[in-house]
């Protein structure tokens, strides 16, 4: 998907859908806490949600099979972050513009700290948004993934699903309000949590202790001395 086609994410209907996603995500992300969070978005100028318990955001955009934003990197390479670096990873329509969505999801799980939250949003393939996207992009629409398929991918990476739902308007018409949640919404969200690593129990080896010879007596007790 070229940069020109990807400008569709700056259009009014997509901006409205992004706003609806932010509103729907808010209740599930308000308790996320920690010093670092990562946003990877198909929209170049996308802004992360305001979450009071989170510290610094690292922002990446996806275009022409490259990462832009705070860090520059190729999309077919590993994310330039250490393991377990982020307490929240938010992928906003990033999987649908990636040529390797499963690898991107694997990298997102790698940099997510145990106990951290992964949040995904995207366009639902079974909605009226698909023909509109095909028309607006002249047949170069992004690859939409079913939430059921994403659920299978997510579970492979030690992540437990907490919430899946459709959001936004069912079709990309003119609308000024925000429809955060809709059973037939054009978008979806998925929230999952990375399992905490279980500490390996240590089996203690019993050790024999030598008997104490000089044992002190309790107060008031007498030592019986043989005559």
Image (spheres, grey):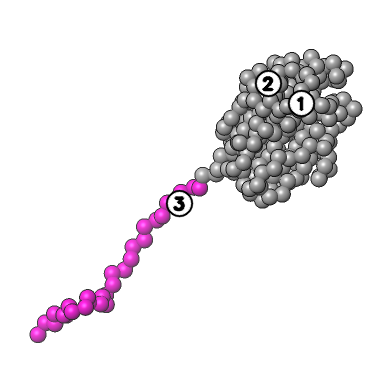
- Distance in Å between CA atoms under marks 3 and 1: 60 Å
Q: Which mark is residue 176?
A: 1
Q: Position of residue 226 (x, y in %)?
A: 11, 82
Q: Residue at x 66, y 18 (%)?
A: 184
First along the sequence among labels 2 and 3: 2
Q: Position of residue 179 (x, y in %)?
A: 68, 25
Question: Which label sits in the foreground, 3 or 1?
Answer: 1
Q: Kindly state the secondary structure of the residue where label 1 is placed.
A: loop
First along the sequence among labels 2 and 1: 1
Near mark 1 (Cα within 10 A), the count class, few <14, some 14-19 or many ≥20, is few
Q: Position of residue 91 (x, y in %)?
A: 71, 34
Q: Is residue 18 left or right of residue 219?
A: right
Question: Which label sits in the foreground, 2 or 1?
Answer: 1
The answer to if 211 sits in the magenta stretch is yes
Q: Is residue 95 above or below residue 227?
A: above
Count of marks overlaid on the render: 3
- Distance in Å between CA atoms under marks 2 and 1: 16 Å
Quadrant including the C terminus: bottom left
Q: Position of residue 7 (x, y in %)?
A: 86, 28
Residue labelled with disc 2: 185
């Amino acid at each position: 998907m070229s940069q020109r086609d990807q400008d569709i994410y700056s259009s009014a209907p997509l901006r409205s859908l992004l706003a609806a996603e932010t509103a729907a995500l808010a209740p599930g992300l308000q308790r996320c806490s920690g010093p670092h969070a990562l946003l990877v978005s198909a929209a170049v100028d996308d802004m992360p949600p305001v979450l009071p318990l989170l510290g610094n955001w690292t922002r990446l955009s996806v275009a022409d099979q490259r990462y832009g934003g705070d860090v520059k990197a190729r999309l077919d390479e590993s994310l330039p972050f250490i393991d377990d670096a982020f307490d929240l990873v938010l992928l906003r329509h990033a999987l649908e513009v990636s040529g390797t969505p499963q690898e991107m999801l694997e990298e997102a799980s790698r940099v997510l700290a145990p106990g951290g939250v992964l949040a995904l949003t995207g366009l639902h393939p079974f909605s009226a948004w698909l023909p509109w996207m095909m028309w607006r992009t002249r047949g170069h629409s992004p690859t939409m993934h079913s939430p059921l398929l994403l659920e299978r991918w997510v579970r492979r990476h030690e992540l437990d699903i907490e919430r899946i739902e459709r959001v936004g308007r069912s079709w990309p018409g003119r609308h000024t309000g925000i429809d955060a949640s809709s059973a037939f919404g054009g978008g979806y969200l998925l929230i999952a949590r990375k399992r905490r690593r279980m500490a390996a129990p240590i089996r203690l080896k019993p050790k024999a202790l030598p008997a104490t010879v000089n044992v002190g007596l309790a107060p008031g007790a007498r030592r019986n001395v043989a005559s």
